[in-house]
Image (tube, rainbow, N blue to C red):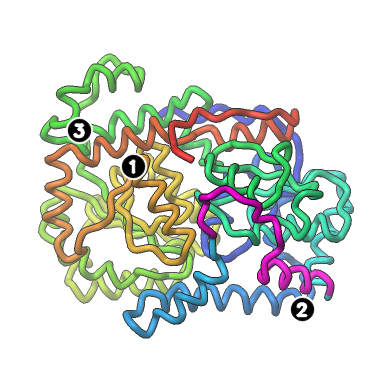
Amino acid sequence: MPTAPQHEHKTEAWVVTVNMGYGHGRAAYPLRDLTDGHYIVANEYEGIPESDKKIWHRSREFYETVSRMAQVPIAGRPVFYLLDKWQEIPEFYPRRDLSEATFQVKQIYKLFEKGFLRDLVERFKKEKLPVISTFNLPALAAEYFGFKGDIYCVLCDTDIARIWAPFSPKKTRIKYFAPNRRVAERLKLYGVPEKNIFLTGFPLPKELVGGLDHTTLKADLAARIANLDPAGTYTRPFGASLSQLLGVSSLPKATRPLTLTFAVGGAGAQREMVGSILQALKEKLFAGSMQLVLVAGSRPDVLAHFRRTIHRLGMDTLPESSLRILYAEDRNAYFALFNNALHTTDVLWTKPSELSFFASLGIPIIIAPTIGSQEVFNENWLRSLGAGIPQGDPAYVDQWLTDWLKSGWLARAAVAGFVGGVKRGTYRIEEIIAHRERFLPEPIEPV
């Protein structure tokens, strides 16, 4: 397997994230080469004031409770409404001025007035380094409390709410790394000056991209296509074009079983689907004709649920070649495990979180039900690319997944994500930090 080239830019920066779901940490992880140790989790760092810790705890508790409750029929609807209102994203058209601060933005600045995140920003001031935050609050606070260095904010969804822009966006010094065209255009509606917006793409793991020529990505995708199109429905008419696109003389034959990876979100939502999935795929897993990878992330409760379910279904004896669980207590260790598993993942089944951008790696996405407004936009983006397909009934995954493979539908989705998605986000962000350069993406994806 080709390895990614060594990092070329040694510019140091504060890379700031939060432990709230996985999205913000997953965006920060590929940027660790820039930090030289200056990596900080804003809601968990050593010495964090108790007052800040309490605010973060309430916020995280609200997010995780609502994410889980949103799965509950009928009773979960009012809870889902609360989450949706907080993350509300207004209609894009007609284009209009949306720069006025919303209630949510005003509440954030009231917290700043009381000193929330002042301690974090004072730490930044001790080092003359730029700040790159994958969450809105540290970036907004850095500007509010007078941090003089460059402030960058990495955006992690395909559309964003007004809370990502500051109270007075037209005067802001914050620069934004937009993962797609819609976010770049949305920031303009929110009043952020165009000169502050860099259209970079999401920061994907360099170990999965393999440099600006996408060496690793192309090798992985070539091997994946063989599993995604066993009947040759898609590759027969397009094989020559695919070989040219991927830089191979001919597409390889399948050398391993089909691998389906099911990823549960950071709040642990949708773990209940695993029982139905295992039951439906039981015969295939025991026959060794496919592998299922269950992603518990860094949540011991999800790990325990997976193990109980496997035991209840009498599947404890399955070897790792048929059934694996990915888990690590440390989040960055989990991200490393997950990224490594994606080399041989053929299909990724997940709710449309920040993992939607991983479709750009040529991995087709089976879209689990959305949680919150931003995930609805992520699903629409995936479907507009042709890179994601909404799930069928998990109890019959053995049937509909087989049909999708026979039709070449998943192979088509893999190629659509690779062609239409932006893959160089991490490299572009590194270049901008090092040289303050502006980049245009290679997008086919729509606004």
On the image, which quarter does residue 264 sit in?
bottom left
> Judging from the image, what secondary structure is the residue with disc 3 in?
loop
Say which residue label 3 marks.
254
Residue plotted at (44% across, 81% down): 78
Residue 387 is tagged as: 1
Q: Are marks 1 and 3 in contact (CB under 8 Å)?
A: no
Q: Describe residue 207's horizontal placement relative to residue 271 as left or right.
A: right
> Mark 3 belongs to which amino acid?
Ala
Q: Residues within 10 Å of mark 3 (few under 14, many from 20)?
A: some
Of badges 1 and 3, the one in the foreground is 1
Q: Position of residue 176 (x, y in %)?
A: 67, 45
- Residue nearest the observer in this picture, 358 or 8: 358
Q: Describe residue 23's horizontal placement relative to residue 444 as left or right.
A: right
Image position of 26 with respect to 241: above or below: below
Image position of 93 with respect to 225: above or below: below
Q: Are marks 1 and 2 in contact (CB under 8 Å)?
A: no
Say which residue label 2 marks.
50
> Mark 1 belongs to which amino acid?
Ala
Split into 4 quadrants, where in the image is the N terminus?
A: top left
Residue plotted at (22% across, 53% down): 322
> Judging from the image, what secondary structure is the residue with disc 2 in?
helix
- Residue nearest the observer in this picture, 81 or 151: 81
Residue 28 visible to an observer of this rendering: no
Label 1, label 2: how many angstroms apart (C-alpha)? 44 Å
Residue plotted at (49% across, 56% down): 334
> Mark 2 belongs to which amino acid?
Glu
Q: Within the magenta stretch, is there residue 93?
A: yes
On the image, which quarter does residue 88 sit in?
bottom right
Q: Which callout, 3 or 2, points at the residue further toward the start of the chain?
A: 2
Of badges 3 and 2, the one in the foreground is 2
